[in-house]
């Protein structure tokens, strides 16, 4: 899960697609349509997913900025292990959006005001 998050932050399409199960994998990803600033990943819990398991789930929240809005995506992801590799199968997610005012602290945790840190433009 952490490697997939890091790959999204770095826009590393090859890793994301390689770690996606072939049954549900898209042909390509487009990072340009929705440019985001990734702020963090919090893992809440996982079920199964040990070395001896063939499936597992991970529940997490990732925070990001999109068009000046703070978004928190909470997802419960399903993974399958095939040939020793964990592959993302699918996830159920909810997205909560909040407006961040220019003079509020930046949600990235820098301690700066939003307008002086991650505010687009």
Image (spheres, rainbow, N blue to C red):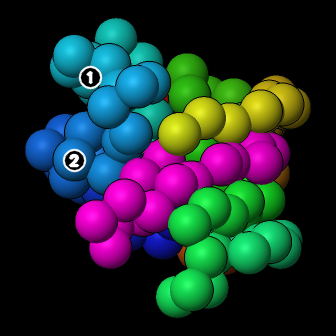
Q: Which residue shows up at 61% across the image and 76% down it?
A: 53
Q: Is residue 84 visible?
A: yes
Residue 109 higher or lower than 121, as above or below: below
Residue underneath mark 2: 18
Q: Residue furthest bottom?
A: 51
Q: Residue at x 45, y 35 (%)?
A: 36
In the drawing, does residue 121 fall left or right of residue 54?
left
Which image quarter is the C terminus in? top left
User: Residue 28, percent across and down?
Assistant: 21, 19
The residue at 68%/48% (across/down) is: 77
Is residue 121 found left or right of 53 in the rendered image? left
Residue 29 located within the stretch drawn in magenta: no
Q: Nearer the viewer, residue 71 or 110?
A: 71
Up/down of 58 relative to 72, above or below: below
Q: Nearer the viewer, mark 2 or mark 1?
A: 2
Residue 79, position as x, y percentages in the image:
57, 54
Disc 1 target residue:
29
- How far apart, in angstroms, are the residues tagged by discs 2 and 1? 12 Å
Residue 6, quarter of picture: bottom left
Image spot of residue 19 (x, y percent): 32, 51
Location of residue 113 (image quadrant): bottom right
């Amino acid at each position: 899960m952490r490697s997939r998050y890091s790959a999204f932050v770095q826009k590393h399409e090859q890793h994301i697609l390689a770690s996606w199960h072939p049954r549900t994998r898209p042909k390509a990803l487009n990072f340009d349509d929705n440019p985001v600033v990734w702020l963090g990943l919090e893992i809440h819990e996982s079920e199964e997913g040990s070395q001896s398991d063939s499936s597992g789930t991970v529940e997490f929240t990732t925070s990001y900025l999109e068009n000046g809005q703070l978004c928190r995506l909470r997802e419960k992801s399903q993974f399958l292990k095939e040939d020793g590799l964990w592959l993302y199968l699918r996830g159920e997610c909810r997205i909560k959006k909040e407006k961040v005012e220019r003079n509020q602290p930046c949600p990235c945790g820098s301690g700066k005001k939003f307008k002086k840190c991650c505010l687009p433009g």
